[in-house]
Every structure is written in structure tokens, then in C-alpha cells.
Image (cartoon, coloured by chain):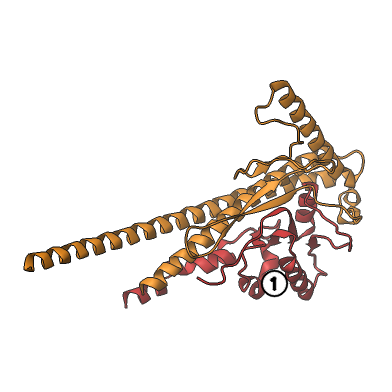
């Protein structure tokens, strides 16, 4: 099989976050906050003034950074940019949808589970039987 | 002559049967691996939700006792600094054509004065960086001293993180910190479960395409 993507080994990659203030505060307390020399942070706090365009741009930025291993994104924020998240298929950084205070986790909306539930759908079973 | 031919046919058909049986077994193993990682993923996400809820509750309690302005994003440190808690990615060769499988492990509270250390490869999600000088045999007294040094360093890093919100902080803020640290451990495990699930899913898709 030609062109198998190589995943470089990385020793200290970052965890990026796109979430509400409390979630970001908590994870910063746990030591994941990073500010680089260009004063760019590895987090975006989403509030009622944050636009969808800002969220999209931040998502694209985090997924293109070489030093980010995991992107945590609140599921309600993911729903705002669902198309973009669902079309993302690289192994790294890993995109993990997390619950938020006001929006509990819903497995029906998780993009990874949506991708694999096809295995259990009646359509795929029916097409095998034909 | 006819006997030789029938022997050859029998051998060919038994080889074919063995081959089909092996393929079925491989596929079953792949399906089991997929279902196991799916179950692990859902269980871990549930456990993560629980840790996060505890963290949010403690944060809200801290905010109530310290005041809203003292636990706020306006106090975040915007000076250049590196993350103390990072992730190490290693590539595992999935023994199939679906590609490689990244493995994530968490490295918590790396100190700014750390020395490069020989890290034993392991898949546990909690790793602490140990200063060089710890021999493989490890004299017990040296080992105890070094582990004390390491835990002091970790405590210093934890306190440094808390000082963002002032010198004296509510105990609830400390417990919130612990809850979010636990949540980070689970996040690393979720990332591994996701990687395993997607790898076995790709393998199943490939098997399906090759059989159809």
C-alpha cells in the first residue's frame, strides 16, 4: 500500500482547548496552558461573543500546528462547526469532544462514533446480503 | 494417476479451507478489538464527565469563597511560558495495512529545571520525569531521595499554577486542580481508545473491500 502516513514521535506536544471559561480555567490549573514567543495561546475561550468564524479559524489553526497532540473541544462548540470537525480525518492531533457544564455529552453527536456506527447500520447489513 | 490427482485436489481444498478459516479468525479478532475499544471509549467518556463535573463544582465553590474577580480568565498569564503538562506521542505499527496507530501518554508537571532522562517506554498514562543519575539497579536510599525531589518539584509546579489566582487560594481551588488532573489522565486514555477504535475500524473496512 503506497503512501502510508508516517506519524512522527513527539516528546512534548500540547493539549489545545476550545471550550467555555470554566473548562479552560480548570485545565490551565492542571498545567496545560502554553504561550509561545508569538504570544499565541493553545486555548480559545468560547462565550456568547465568540463568532463561528473565530471558532473555525482557531480549529484550523490548532489542527495544522505541529506541536499539538490533542484538541479538546466542547461538544456544543463542535456542533457549531460540525461540518469542519466531521471532515477532519487525520490521526494527529486527536480531536476529542468533551461535555460542558450546561451541555452533557451526547454520543449520538460524537463525530468518531458517527463515523464508525456505519458498521452497525441496517443499510450496511442489507447491502452485504444482496 | 487418478489417485494422485484426487490427492492433489484434496490437499488444495484443505489448504483453501484453512486459509478461509484463518481469515475468519483474523476478522473476528479485529471485530472484538473494535468492540473492546468502543466500549472503553464510551466508559472513559462517562468517567471523564464525572471528573469534569467535580472540577466545575469545586471551581464554582472556589469562586464563591474567593470572589468572582479572583477566579477569572482575566487573570490568565499571557507571558511566554511552556506547558507543564504535555503529551508524548509514539507510533505503534498496526500489524495491518490500515496504517499506524499513535499512542498518547501524559507527562504531568515537567519542571523547568528538568534534565533529559532515560525514559523507559511504557503505556501507562501517568509519567513523571526523573532526573538523570538514577541507575537501573537503584540504591533504595538514592531512589527515595530522588522521588522526594521529584514530588517536591511537582508540588512547586502545582503551586505555581495556583498562584495565577493569587497567593492565598481557597482549598476548593486545589481540589478543582486535582479533579482536572484526573480528567487529563482520562483524556489520554480516551485518545488511545479512539486511536485503537479507528485503527480496527479501518482494518474492518479494508477486509470488507477485499472480500467483496
Residue lying furthest top: B141
Q: Residue at x 74, y 50 (%)?
A: B86
Question: Residue B16 lies in what quarter of the image?
Answer: bottom left
Relative depth, front residue between A122 and A112: A112
Q: Residue at x 60, y 50 (%)?
A: B189
Q: Secondary structure at mark 1?
A: helix
The residue carrying pointer 1 sits among few (fewer than 14), some (14 to 19) or many (20 or more) residues within 10 Å by Cα, namely some
Question: Residue B21 lies in what quarter of the image?
Answer: bottom left
Q: Residue at x 90, y 53 (%)?
A: B75
Picture layout, residue B162 above or below residue A114: above
Residue A30, image x, y percentages: 77, 46
Colour of the chain lettered A? red
Residue lying furthest left: B2
Relative depth, front residue between B111 and A86: B111
Any part of residue A49 in sight = yes
Query: On the picture, is B138 further left or further right than B19?
Result: right
Residue that label 1 marks: A80
Relative depth, front residue between B106 and B43: B106
Residue A102, image x, y percentages: 70, 59
Picture layout, residue B134 above or below residue B161: above
Residue B184, image x, y percentages: 69, 48
Quarter of the image that includes the C terminus of chain A: bottom left
Question: Residue A69 lies in what quarter of the image?
Answer: bottom right
Q: Which chain is orange?
A: B
Any part of residue B51 in sight = no
Relative depth, front residue between B103 and B3: B3
Number of numbered labels in the structure image: 1
- Please state the chain letter of the residue tagged with numbered disc 1 in the rendered image: A
Q: Residue at x 29, y 63 (%)?
A: B20
Residue lying furthest front: B1
Amino acid at each position: 500500500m503506497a503512501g502510508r502516513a508516517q506519524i512522527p514521535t513527539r516528546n512534548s506536544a500540547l493539549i489545545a482547548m476550545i471550550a467555555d471559561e470554566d473548562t479552560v480555567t480548570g485545565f490551565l490549573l492542571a498545567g496545560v496552558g502554553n504561550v509561545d514567543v508569538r504570544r499565541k495561546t493553545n486555548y480559545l475561550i468560547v462565550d456568547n461573543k465568540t463568532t463561528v468564524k473565530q471558532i473555525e479559524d482557531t480549529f484550523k489553526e490548532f489542527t495544522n500546528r505541529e506541536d499539538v497532540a490533542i484538541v479538546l473541544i466542547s461538544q456544543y462548540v463542535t456542533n457549531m462547526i460540525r461540518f469542519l470537525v466531521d471532515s477532519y480525518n487525520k490521526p494527529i492531533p486527536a480531536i476529542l469532544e468533551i461535555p460542558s457544564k450546561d451541555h452533557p455529552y451526547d454520543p449520538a453527536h460524537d463525530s468518531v462514533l458517527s463515523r464508525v456506527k456505519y458498521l452497525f447500520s441496517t443499510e450496511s447489513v442489507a447491502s452485504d446480503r444482496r | 494417476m487418478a489417485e494422485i490427482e484426487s490427492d492433489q485436489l484434496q490437499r488444495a481444498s484443505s489448504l483453501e479451507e484453512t486459509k478461509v478459516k484463518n481469515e475468519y479468525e483474523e476478522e473476528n479478532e479485529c471485530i472484538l478489538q473494535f468492540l473492546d475499544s468502543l466500549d472503553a471509549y464510551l466508559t472513559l467518556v462517562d468517567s471523564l464527565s464525572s471528573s469534569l463535573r467535580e472540577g466545575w463544582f469545586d471551581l464554582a465553590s472556589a469562586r464563591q469563597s474567593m470572589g468572582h474577580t479572583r477566579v477569572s480568565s482575566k487573570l490568565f498569564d499571557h507571558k511566554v511560558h511552556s506547558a507543564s503538562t504535555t503529551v508524548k506521542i509514539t507510533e505503534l505499527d498496526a500489524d495491518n495495512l490500515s496504517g499506524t496507530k499513535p499512542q498518547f501518554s501524559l507527562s504531568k508537571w515537567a519542571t523547568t529545571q528538568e534534565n533529559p532522562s532515560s525514559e523507559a517506554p511504557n503505556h501507562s498514562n501517568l509519567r513523571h520525569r526523573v532526573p538523570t543519575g538514577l541507575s537501573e539497579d537503584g540504591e533504595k536510599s538514592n531512589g527515595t531521595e530522588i522521588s522526594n525531589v521529584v514530588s517536591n518539584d511537582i508540588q512547586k509546579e502545582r503551586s505555581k499554577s495556583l498562584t495565577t489566582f493569587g497567593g492565598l487560594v481557597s482549598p476548593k481551588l486545589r481540589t478543582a486542580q486535582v479533579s482536572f488532573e484526573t480528567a487529563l489522565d482520562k483524556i489520554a486514555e480516551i485518545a488511545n481508545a479512539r486511536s485503537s477504535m479507528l485503527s480496527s475500524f479501518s482494518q474492518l473496512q479494508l477486509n470488507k473491500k477485499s472480500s467483496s
